[in-house]
Each structure stands twice: as structure tokens, then as C-alpha cells.
Image: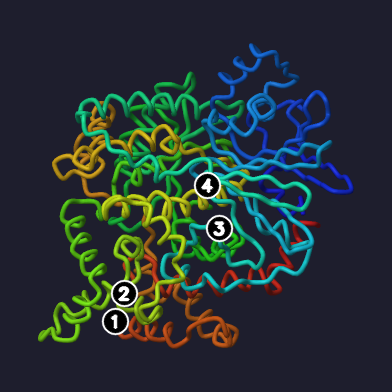
Amino acid sequence: MSSMILHRGPDDEGFYESEWFSAAFRRLKIIDLSEKAHQPMFDFSGDYLIVFNGEIYNYLELRKELISAGFSFKSDSDTETLLNSYLHWGEACLSKFCGMFAFLIADLKKRKIFFARDQLGIKPLHIYDDGDRIVFASEMKSLIPLGGLEPDWSSLNEYLVFRSLPGANTLVKNMRRLLPGHSGTYSKGNLRISQYFSLAETMRTNKNISFSEACAETEAALEESVKFHMRSDVELGVQLSGGVDSSLISAIASKTSPRRLHSFSISFDDPALDESEYQKRVSERYGTIHHDYRMDEALFVSLLDHAVWSYEEPLNDPNSVCTLHLALKSKEYITVMLSGEGADESFLGYARFNPISVAILARRNFLFKHALLRKSLLKFWPMKKGRDIFKVSAYRPSLYSLTYADLNLLDGLLSGDGSCMSYRNEIADLAANILDEAILQDEVCDLPQWFYRADKMGMAASLEFRVPFCTEKLFRLANSFPYEIRVAGGERKAVLKKIAEKYIDKDQIYRKKIGFGTPVESWMRGRGPYRELFDDTINSNSFKERHFLNHRHFQTAYDADKSGIYKEGNSAFLWTYFNVELWYRSFFEDAGRGKQAAVRD
């Protein structure tokens, strides 16, 4: 089981076994490179054991506090700080941590386990419970050597629509995720899980703050966060896309670092996706050693299988393949990478949050909530134009603004039944209004897939991605700002853009947002290796015989694509069906077993 995740920690391994509890750990050395930081780690008494994946960025401050309280330390690691924090504060220690973490602490005398995952869910923690045993794991593939893994298709439609599963459900039977901001205990056969942090509870608007005050508070919090995230005993770099978020991180990190930083980017030949000019500007201004890696269609296809195996679920976005390539290449120079993830979600950077889109969202929400009116309009509306909006407004608009799928095709799959989206609906129900619904969908239901991408693709290359925008403090701060401040003057992400004026050229800040796009759409229209692989896959006998797929629905989208009626603007149903097949082959057929054998050899 440990060998299955060798990539997560090639520097060291450790084991503990007893009649009731066993632990294995793979270590990627980042803080305290000595053997004193070996895991599983014990406290001085030998009664407590910890296995910990992640980083506690404020460990130095907590260490001082613990020493003042009488604790001694045998290492300089954040792992020991975490363990002693639990011994001192108990479960309340979670409120002390600024970091990304998934950990398990065993009380070996009382035979009790405490486990937790960070507030935002940056680091993963899977729980497998088949009735005979409970296994906690960073990656699901650790369970393959036990045998008996089976797919669970109850959440398949949610994946097909959204490309991700944000809640506890996975596509593997008996496997669930511990939700972000949750912790639990296991003792005497009883597993209990509870929530200790909720993003919904941070949606408390401070109406008295001014735009300039919001900018000042955000800049101070961001500078503090970057400083914390740069704590490392190994080489560190920055992911530089050329956008506002990564450029801000690069600028602040470069000013903070005592040495010249490496910066890394992915670029394409497609001029619509190329940001190399802006990457070069930031790199030259702040003196980074810049590395630009080109991604073409053939390289993308060659990495696709590796990406699916690493991601452990059908891929979310094509850019996950690009992230894997970036991580594999960057590992030649660094072990830790700062990334700009999370700023769009907390400071409202997406087009769906501009004033016009928010107004449209409100109108659709009105139709959604007034079913009789919606059905009457659909029945009696005299013109063809406009009928679609009454049809698709049967689906909660705050949820479905996150999908790239055509809403009429979506309706063809769900037939008006959105009950499979229970977790997304639960999150929406926590909001006071439609705008907060949409924000929580972004922060709670969409952001996890980008954390998942960073963790799984980074660790596939034995590289740690860190996300300075993603701290409890920064999200709590951003969610306290009124919409009129976050989108001041109709400018999305206005607070961060104003701060960025100190660090980046204005024409770079206020240009059209590109994002981390991948030219899959143009590859689909061509006759190159991607289209060839796609056609070979979906025309294979194995794909056609998958009983769990809605072949009629897929064929509707595929036929529309071939006739030129339908084009996927990013990655929707053609991508998700394609990736379900790739994933199923990888994990449940010969390919998965072959990879297991290869790892063991």
C-alpha cells in the first residue's frame, strides 16, 4: 500500500504495526530534512503517534507558544509542532493552524484515533470502510493491493455535468472523502465525524468598510500569507501564468526571498491562450529565473494516461494534464511551488460575477423558485426563441453556472431531476441570497477540484504546490467585503487588481482574462493525435458496452459535434464521457493492475 504512493514521498518511508492499528508513511522532505522528522512520529512518552501530510505554516510561532507552556522538542519539524499542539489544546488545536493538512493521531494506550483535514480542503483525506476495516489514505490507489475495489456510479451524472465531485462521495464503492473543515474520532468500533469550520459562516458582510480599507487589509494579509508559505528547507519557486493572481504572488515572493526565485509556466502555440509576453514582463521586473514549457497536442496525448492515473478520478479539466507536465519539468529545479489558486473564488474574478451576469442569475432564480409560472410560460410561450430559458430554469441556477455543459444537453441527461446534486444543494441552502449561493458554490463546490488538481498532479512529480491565497484568514476577510467592493465599478476582483497596480503594469492587470485554457476544442476539430485517441476510445467495443453510461445521451452530443451543430467551449460532455472510459480502464481493468505491479517492481 505504501509503494502505491511512492511518488508522494520518495525521500523516506516509515511503518508501525499492532494488532488493532497499522500506519505507513511516505515522506517528501521539506521542513527539517533530518531523520528526526521521520514519520510515523511519536511523542516523548511513546503513547501518541502521528502521520501528517501537508504543512503548518505558522509552526514556528506555535512552537514558541508550546515551549513557553513547558513542551520540549526533539526536531525542528512542523509535524512535531502539530502533535504537541494536539497534546496541549486537544481538538481545539485546529483553530490554531494556518496551513494545509490531513493528519491522523493515534492514542495507542486508549486505542483512539483523531483525524482532521484543513479548513478549505487543500490536502486530501480518503476514508475506506467496507464493514471489516477502516483505512485512511491520501490517495485511493493505496487500496488497490487490498483487492476488491469496485466503482460506485451513484454520483456519475454529477461528474458528467460538473467534471468534479465536491462532497464526500467518490466513484469508488465504500470510499468517501473527509470534507474540508471536518475532523473525526474512531474508538471501539465507532467512527464519528464533525465540522469545525464552515465557509458559509464567513459570509457576514462588513458594510462599514471602505474600498481603500479593504485593499489595505487584503495586502497586509496576503504579504503575511506569502511569507508563511515560503517557509521551506528545500528549493522553492512560483507558478507564473501572467495573470494578476500568479503575478502578485511572484512579485511579493520575489521581494521576500533572500535568493533569486525560479518561475515556471505552460504556454501554447495558440495565440488566444498565449500569455508569455506577460510572464516575461513579471519575470524580468522581479528577476526570476523563468522556465517556459510548451504544450502541444502530441505531448498532451502522451501524458493523458499518466494524468488520469495520478488524478484517480476521471479528469476535471484538460489543464490538469498541463499541470502534470509543469510539475514534472519543474521538479528538476524545485520541490515547492507557490500557485495563485483561490483568488478568483474569494475575490470574485469569474465572468459570472459581473453585474450583468448577477442580474441574469437573479432572473433565472426567480423562474426556478416559481415553478408554476415557469411551466405556464413554457407551455404558452408563442415564440421558439426564449423557450429554452424556461426549460433549463428548472435547475437551480447558482449550481449550474459552474458547468461548461450546454443546458439543453444537460436537461437531456437529467430530465429535470437534479436530486443527484444533494451536496451542492445543501451548500446553496446555507446562503441568505442568490449571490451568496453563487459565491458558496464557487468556494465550496468548485474550488476543491483545483486543490485536487494541484495536490495529485504535483505529488505525481514529488512536488508540493502551495496556495497563499487559500488561508482561512484571507477567505474570511474576502467574504466580509460587500459585493460592491469586490466588484467595484463593475470590475471583477477589483481589490486584488488595485493592489496589483503597485507591482504590475496596468495594461496587464486590466486586460481580458484568459485563464489556464487548453486548446482541446481546436484539437477536436482537427485530425491530430487527440481526435484520433478520442474517436478510437469512444468507438471501441469496451466503451459501447459500458452499461453504466447513458449512450443515447452521449450519442446526441457526439452526433451534434460531428455535424458542427455543437462545440464544447471548454470541456463538457464529450470530455467527461471520454474520461470516464479512460479512468475505468486505468483503475478497474488491466491497466490499473499493471501499474500496481510496475510500482512494486
Extreme-left residue of the structure: 382
Q: Tag 1: residue type?
A: Gly
Name the foreground residue: 227 vs 522.
227
| SS assignment at label 4 | loop
Question: What's the mark number on residue 288?
Answer: none
| Residue at x 22% of width, y 60% of height | 361
Q: Is mark 1 on a helix, strand or loop?
A: loop
| For residue 543, above or below residue 145 | below
Q: Which of 76 and 46 is in front in this view?
A: 46
- Mark 4 crowdedness (10 Å alpha carbons): few <14, some 14-19, many ≥20: many
Q: Do the residues labelled 4 and 2 touch (CB within 8 Å)?
A: no
Q: At numbered mark 3, what does the secondary structure look like: helix, strand or loop?
A: loop
- The amino acid type of the residue labelled 4 equals Pro
* Label whose residue precedes the other's in the sequence (4 or 3): 3
**Mark number, residue 567:** 2
Q: Position of residue 172 (x, y in %)?
A: 63, 66
Q: What residue type is labelled 3?
A: Ala
Residue for badge 3: 168
Disc 4 designates what residue? 180
Q: Position of residue 510 (x, y in %)?
A: 20, 41
Discs 2, 1 touching: Cβ within 8 Å = yes
Mark yes or no: residue 78 visible. no
Using the image, tell me which numbered label, if any, was put on residue 564: 1
Crowd around label 2: few <14 · some 14–19 · many ≥20 (10 Å): many
Residue 444 located left or right of residue 112 = left
Determine whether label 2 and label 3 are within 8 Å by CB.
Answer: no
Q: Quadrant of the N terminus?
A: bottom right
Tell us which disc is closer to us: 2 or 3. 3
